[in-house]
Image (cartoon, grey):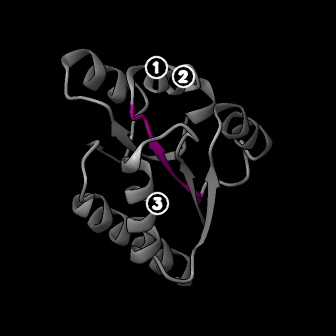
Amino acid sequence: MNLVLFIHEDSSENGIQLKNHIQQEINGIDLQIFQTFNSLKSRLKCFSHYRDRDIFILLAESKKRWNELVSLIDLLEDKRIILILPDDSKITISGAHKLFPRFFTFVNDTYDDLGEVLKKMIKKEKIKTTN
């Protein structure tokens, strides 16, 4: 299992805080970080069928980034996704549901809720692979 983290290279301090928080929360799990939309898209295309255990954490810090991620809906199908959304508008939340994320939250400076969900997902995967 890998964690695939998308934080765009133009991300603000929130992206750095998210990356640091995730690195503190996980142990023994490979973390792949993608900082451009094209590199994420390539990653999704290359491993579209046989990496179903991966968890994708996608930061959409702005409406522009959100729209780019939504355009990947076909490549994100059947992936375990955690979304960090730019706002809590009805349009954004409605779009998020179309991606069928395991969890979504909003851009903030703590990401404590995300850390707890991530720990549970990793623990569940470890139990599943040992049985």
Q: Is residue 114 above or below residue 88?
A: below
What amino acid type is highlighted by mark number 3? Lys
Q: Is residue 69 above or below residue 40?
A: above
> Upstream in the sequence, badge 3 or badge 2?
3
Instruction: Compare residues 31 and 129 and report the one nearer the observer.
Output: 31
x and y, in percent, of residue 41 in the image: 69, 34
What stretch of residues is rendered in magenta? 53-61
Judging by the rendered image, the residue that carries numbered circle 1 is 64
CA gap, disc 2 and disc 1 = 6 Å
> Upstream in the sequence, badge 1 or badge 3?
3
- Marks 1 and 2: in contact by CB < 8 Å? yes
What amino acid type is highlighted by mark number 2? Glu
Determine the residue positioned at 49% across, 78% down. Answer: 126
Determine the residue positioned at 30% across, 62% down. Answer: 117
CA gap, disc 1 and disc 3 = 20 Å
Position of 54 with respect to 61 (left or right) is right
Q: Is residue 21 above or below residue 47?
A: below
Q: Is residue 88 above or below residue 25?
A: above
Determine the residue positioned at 68% across, 55% down. Answer: 51
Position of 101 with respect to 33 (left or right) is left
Judging by the rendered image, the residue that carries numbered circle 3 is 19
x and y, in percent, of residue 73 in the image: 54, 25
Q: Pointer 2: residues within 10 angstroms few (<14), some, or many (20+)? A: few
Q: Secondary structure at mark 2?
A: helix
Position of 21 with respect to 88 (left or right) is right
Judging by the rendered image, the residue that carries numbered circle 2 is 68
